[in-house]
Amino acid sequence: MKKLFYLFIITIVIFASCNTNSQKDKSTKTFQPLATETPARPSGQKHVLGLTTPKMDTVRVGFIGLGMRGPGAVQRFTHIPGTKIVALCDLHPDRVEKTQTILDNAGLPRAAEYSGSEDAWKELCQRDDIDLVYIATDWKRHAPMMIYAMEQGKHVACEVPAAMTMDEIWNVVNTAERTQKHCMQLENCVYDFFELTTLNMAQQGVLGEILYAEGAYIHQLEDFWNSYEADWRMEYNKTHRGDIYATHGMGPACQVLDIHRGDKMNYLVAMDSKPVSIPAYLKEKRGEEVTDFKNGQHTMTFIKTENGKTIHIQHDVASPRPYSRMYLVQGTKGFANKYPKQGYALKADAVEAENMPNLENLTAHSYVPDEVKQALMEKYKHPIHKELEETAKKVGGHGGMDFIMDYRLVYCLQNGLPLDMDVYDMAEWCCLAPLTELSLNNNSAPVAIPDFTRGHWNDVKGFRHALNQ
Ligand SMILES: NC(=O)c1ccc[n+]([C@@H]2O[C@H](COP(=O)([O-])OP(=O)(O)OC[C@H]3O[C@@H](n4cnc5c(N)ncnc54)[C@H](O)[C@@H]3O)[C@@H](O)[C@H]2O)c1
C-alpha cells in the first residue's frame, strides 16, 4: 500500500514537471510561418528593379484574348498616340473580326489575324514587328503566354491575376530577369481617382506614417458566370480555396506601403467562411450538385510587413452585397476610406496645417466635410490625373482608370522610363492565391511571403511614378 502511495506521488510529480516544462515550451516557442521554396537566382541573371529599355517612338502591340475584356483594351489603344495595333489573336475568328471593326471605326488599318487554334498566339509572339504583347486571356494561360512572349524578345502586359501558382510566379520572375524585358501586370485599380489622390497625399506626408491598409474584391458575379470562355472562372473557383483574385485590393495597398521599395511583406494568415451561395447557384441554375466546392464564400487575409505595418484583404464573389474594393488607408495623422463612404479624416492640427476652410470642429473622429474633401482632392490631384483626367473620362474603361493604365504603360515605354508596376509587384500581388490556399488548408497557419526581389527589397526608397522631366 505504502509502495503504491509513493508510486502515485512520483507519478504526480513527473506529470506536474512535464506539464510545467511543456507550458514553458509553449510560452517561449515562436511558431515559424510555413515556408515555400525561394529558388536561388540563377548565376549571371540580375534583378529588374528600375528596369529601363531604349526609348521607342511607336509602341507596336499584339493583343491575345478578345473576350469580354480584351476588345476594350484595343479600343483604348486607338486613343493613345504613338501606338500601332499590329496583330489580334483569339481562339475564335469571329471575336478577332469583331475587334477589327474597332480599328475600322477608328480609321486605322486592320491588324494581322491569329485564331482557330490553341497555339496561334505563338505565331503572334514570333513576329519581329511587335514590341509589346498584351494578354487578356483566362488565368491559366497567362503565365505560359508571358514567358513565351518574353523569350521571343517582347515586353509583356498581362491582365490580372497574371500568375496563379508559386511555380508560375517564379518562372515569370526568372524569365523577366533573364531576358531583361518589362513584365507588367495590368492592375487598373491603382490608377483610380480616389486611390491615386490618396497615394499622393500619403507620399506628401498628409496622412503621417501609414500603418495599415485594406483592399478587396467584393463583387457578386452571378450575372457573369455564364459568359467566361469554357467556364474557366467557375472551374477555378470550384477547385481552389483562397483569395484567387487579390490584385485589385493588393495593388493600391502595396503602393501606399512602399512594398519592395523600403518594406516587404513577411507573412500572411487567411480565413474563409464555407461556400454556400455559388454551390446553391450551380444547383438552381445549372442543375449541378457540387459537394466539394472549394472557394470560400468570403475570404479574409491579414499580412504583416517587415516594418511592422499590416494589410487586410478580402475576396467575395458570392454574396449579395454592394460592390466594394474596401480601400482604406490609415496613417498616424489621417485616414482615407473609399467604400461605402468616400472620404478623409485628419487630425485637427493636420487640417489646420493644410490651411483648409475650418467649416466645423474637425477632429479625427469624423470625416472632413465635403468641401474640405473636395479641396484636399484638388490640392493633391496626382500629376498623372492632372494630365489625363479629361481624356480618361472620355475614353473610359472603369471610369477612366483603364485608359490611364494603358497610357502610362505606353508613356514609360516611349520615354525609356521604368514602368509603374514591375514583375515583383506582379509576384507579390499574385502570391496571395497560392499562399492563402496553403494557410487555409493548414487551419489558418501563418505562411511566409517570399522576398521576390531576392535581397533587393530595400534598394529603392519609396514608390514613385516615373515622369519625364
Ligand atoms: N482589370 C479588370 O478590371 C478586369 C476586368 C475583367 C476581366 N479581367 C481579367 O481579364 C482576363 C480575361 O477576362 P475575360 O472576362 O475577358 O474572360 P473571357 O473568357 O471573356 O475572355 C478570354 C478570351 O481569351 C480567349 N482565349 C483563351 N485561350 C486562348 C488561346 N489559347 N489563344 C487565344 N485566345 C484565347 C478566349 O477565346 C476568350 O475570348 C482575366 O484575367 C480577367 O481576370 C480584368
Image: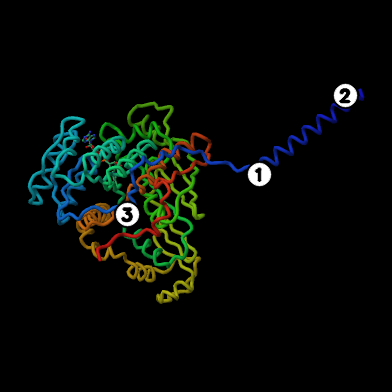
Task: Tell me the distance, in whole angstroms, between the alpha carbons under discs 1 and 3.
Answer: 42 Å
Mark 2 or 3: in front is 3
Question: In x, y percent, where is residue 187?
Answer: 31, 49
Residue under label 2, please give it.
4
* Of the image marks 2 and 1, the number of the one nearer the N terminus: 2
Circle nearer the N terminus (2, 3):
2
| Colour mapping | rainbow
Residue 328 in picture, x, y percent from top left:
43, 56
Q: CA distance from mark 2 to mark 3?
A: 76 Å
Q: Is residue 416 left or right of residue 17?
A: left
Check disc 1 and report the residue beneath it.
28
**Number of the front mark, 1 or 3:** 3
| Whole-percent x, y for residue 61 in the image | 17, 46
Determine whether, in the image, residue 372 is placed left or right of residue 181: right
Q: Which residue is mark 3?
A: 50
Three-letter amino acid code at the position of disc 3: Gly
Q: Quadrant of residue 352?
A: bottom left
- Quadrant placement of the C terminus: bottom left
